Amino acid sequence: MLWLLAIVPFVVAAGLAVARPRERRHLAYTAAGTLALTLVLALAAAIEGWSAGLVWGPMLRLQAELVPLSAVVATTIPAVALPITLYAAVHEDQRGITRLIALLLAFVGAMELLVIAADLLTLLIGWELVGACSWALIGHHWREAKKPAAGRYAFVMTRLGDLGLFVAAMAAFAGTGSFTYTALAELDGPLLELLTAGILISAAAKSGQVPFAPWLFRAMEGPTSVSALLHAAAMVAAGAFLLARLHPVLGPVPWFGPAAMGIGLVTALGGGVVATLQADAKKLLAASTSAQFGLMFIAVGAGYPAVAVLHLVMHAAYKALLFLAAGIAGERTGSFELAEMRYGRALPGIAAVTAVGSLALAGVPPLGGAASKEAVIAAAGHSGPAVAVMVAIVGALSAVYATRFQLLTYGRGEREAARSPVRLETAALAALAAASLLLSAVWVPAVHSVAAAWLGELSASKVWELVVSLLAVGVGIYAGRLLVLTYPALGSTGSAAALADWLGLPAAVHMLIGRPARAMARAAAVLDDRALDALPRSAAVMGRHLAALGGRFGELLADGLPLGLAQIVGLGGNDVRRMQTGMTQHYYAAMAVGTAVLTFILLWGAWA
Amino acid sequence: MLTVAIVLPLVAAGVLAIYAGAGERSARWFAVAVSAVPLALLTIVWLGFETGRGAPTFQWVAEAPWIPTLGVGWRVGVDGIALAIATMSALLFVAAIAWPAETQGRARQYYAWLLFLEGVSLGVFLVLDLLLFYVFFDLSLVGMYFLIGGWGHGDARGAALKFFVYTLAGSLALLLAILALVLSTEPLTFDMRELIARQPLAGSQMRGGLVLLGFLIGFAIKTPLFPVHTWLPPAHVDAPAPASAILAGVLLKMGTYGLVRIPYAMMSATFARYALVIGIVAVVSILWGALVAMAQRDLKRRIAYTSINHMGYAVLGIAAAGAMLGGEETARRLALTGATVEMVAHGLITGALFLISGSFWQRTADYDLEHYGGLAGPAPRLTATTTLASFASLGLPGLAGFVAEFQIFVGTFAVFPWLAAIGLIGIVITAALFLQMLQQLFAGPLPQRLATFPDLGRIELAVLTVLLALVVIIGVYPAWLLALINSTAEILVGGSGTH
């Protein structure tokens, strides 16, 4: 039964690919119905405790089950995908709209598979299918060559990380003879460390952590709705989710905590700086995604997977909202240049709804985003006050770029909007904003304790942490406002622009991986043609000479082949004598018949 | 049953060769009908194949004496591995024959050669006599030589000659090895079952090593492995598309199948001693094939080099499975099962890719990737099938290639952890090169001269749909295939009675 969560969206996607309805309304209803059904199924599965299994082979078995953490994520995915897909059905270009909606559904299906997985093989299947969907979605507008190139970049970069999961699966099988999560508890020693390293690398690649972060930037070539889903609930969410899900296995490895926190902290700080300096609305949000997932890595590293999942859910709601809002502003501007927007006067309703998302991103209480961020700070605080302060700085940076985003996209300006958004677009944004507001309930102690009871321990903030963090948010908002007033076009030129391109990381990846790989391929190809082929080439030349001498190659071969065979058999020496005892006629008869047949075949071939 | 599967296409080939009245259309449909018979027969054999414990290794055995003093006989029979590969081959032959090819006015001869090739290829996989194996192995070269030379394009004669001379050299090494192996038996026998049971060279280090070397050279050239692979790209580039599909899908499998059938099974102790070397060569092939493929601008050369990469995976699995005589049975069984699935998957996937490249050639007579672009517009069906085949080839889960590669890597890791880890890099390179190829062909602006590029025709689409549907089925639910292969892998791996 649990497979249905993944199968339903896939089947509908396949149906759309075959039936090809072009009417937006039909697409919207079909997609919404499918996702609503998936949502209901996810809730039912969580309540009823469904599980599933499928035998692939004597040694391979796919398994699925829901634990509280995965049930939360499995529910979040269709819930967030629903408004996004509705928005896509009305917002995106008519050309290829059916393909887009079908792929978005498949994306959800693959993501659900990854979330319900209870063994590494099932996980790997979902994991890579998510990557393939993102390839197709990022390159959706394939007529512009750079878009599929960005899709390829994303796929190859994340697949490089996927090798970590392959290694993890190999280590698990070598140690336990199976792939199930439950069996992983038996692992210890080097195999457990190998598994941990593999999973950490895969998760970092998927979640756009350093050094894999650049693919998230290139992924911005995709349509806005794709970015929204990719950043909020699918693909990127997979990394942090996996770490949280497997924390019981990974946690005991002594270096896991520091490593995950280190990756998360570096990415969160770097992403914060990048987002602060970005001049492009979507890239600002992309860098902030890396940073927010950095926070989740910190939470898991600190030993609080439930906090990471809580932040994942909050982030899904507000980040989807912000992307969709950016899409509306971008459509009217014709680009995503932050300096060209400011639709606050023209679209006051959208501006107000967007503000909910921006405040949540900034971490302003009483929004849910603030609650989960405070929990991350508290979790980090267990590793020392310095770490907590650094996370608070990450929070300050979030406030800076959230303020910039809000004021530049929907601040008050003179821009006129060519047309107001259609009803479904507004409804999608409003639904996501309502979700963000609803999630604020987590501040209520009763709700908080219920969540903690179900998900696991949610660390409580110390008073000084809360004070420092709130101060940081205040400073951040102020700084963001100042930046907007003094440097509205920040990040479009000069060293700020250079830093805004992920601190030069894409160039480094290109220099260290892309270029050498291509150079090696070219060198290998040259070597292959020149050196390795020299021997057979000389043989071929010789053959041609022989053919020239003997007239037609076919005839020569007809004589040569059996003759050659006979000679080689003759080389067998003493042993061959045994062959000839008594039954020589048989042997020669067989040989003669064989030669005749062969000669006939060869002659006929040469003639034909 | 199996005899009919081998002999019927051969007889039909003879009929087509002699009967001058057959026109293009009738020759084609006659050939399609004939080639479907072995497929049907093998399907029946599959359905009747017992996979339970205690089931005989070789089933559907039939034999007739031929040269009793030499221990030569007409012996046919299959185990799970042979049956899986033979059935895939039979299917691929139907696909290749049904494919609308340019027969240059010599349809009768073209289809006769394809049927001839089908008969001898199935012979290689179905016989249980070493001499017959060798004869069929060699005759496959002859059939392919004339298909490439007669119906190829570009420097077809040259490519065919290179192919023939190169692989014939491999066959000679193979022949020497076979003779040396057989001559050490007393009484003399070419019966594969006997040879497997007797392990003739188990005691002799030196001789065993040399004989193994002979087999390895012979099969490495056929597979092909680095560094004896350079005959493959020109043969593919100049061959007609269906011949290319057969060459990659069926003929290359003779190398890996032979490796499992003969040195692995008949001289397991010697094989285990040198398994690491074989594994290293396989990993080099994996990386080299992928790297060189990435630098190719020619569509067919690119696919050809990925064959070297994929066959490297298969050989890596075989090497890991045969690396020891006892211990790590589960992992080694996984590796051998994976290697066999790789052979089947590669046959279907690369067969489809080569047929697709034929569609390109028929429309533009051009394989240069840089001359293409934007074809997703005029040719959506071609785009969809090529994308699916490419993702299958780069090992995307849900498609057949993944089922193979995952098992190979996981199985190999328990035996040769470093080789498995290094080999993994291959799957990233293939991802990059296939996505780049897709982008080059189908994305970006459409050049003016390609504006009228026709999409796949009805037959083309039908053939590719069948092949790719199987790729998807194996990828999503491979239980039926794995059960068959595993039953034999269990016997081959657990040789010391541990299963």
Image (cartoon, coloured by chain):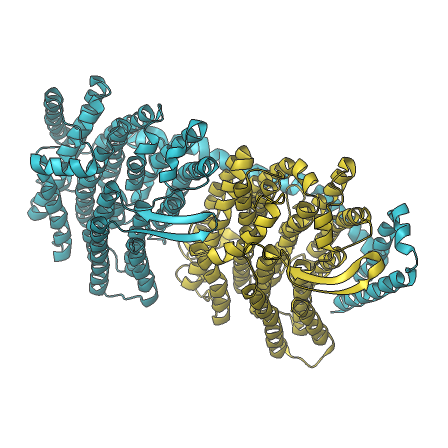
Chain colours: A cyan, B yellow
> What is the tally of numbered marks visible in this picture?
0
Residue for point 29% across, 53% down: A2
**How far across and down, in percent of the image, does residue A456 sit?**
20, 35
Q: Does residue B91 appear anywhere in the picture?
A: yes
Q: Which quarter of the picture shows residue B415? A: top right
**How far across and down, in percent of the image, does residue A433 sit?**
12, 45
Q: In this view, does A60 lie to the left or right of B37?
A: left
Q: In which quarter of the image is the C terminus of chain A?
A: bottom right
Q: Which of B274 and B186 is in front in this view?
A: B186
Would you place residue B452 above or below residue A7 in this image? below
Q: Does residue A494 appear anywhere in the picture?
A: no
Would you place residue A325 above or below residue A566 in this image? above
**How far across and down, in percent of the image, does residue A59 sit?**
47, 47
Residue for point 52% across, 35% down: B422
Q: Nearer the viewer, residue A182 or B263?
A: A182
Q: Which of A181 and A427 is in front in this view?
A: A181
In the displayed orientation, state which residue is furthest to the bottom: B21
Residue for point 16% across, 33% down: A372
**How far across and down, in percent of the image, does residue B234 sit?**
64, 52
Q: Which of A238 and A608 is in front in this view?
A: A238
Q: Which quarter of the picture shows residue B134? A: bottom right
Q: Quadrant of the N terminus of chain A?
A: bottom left
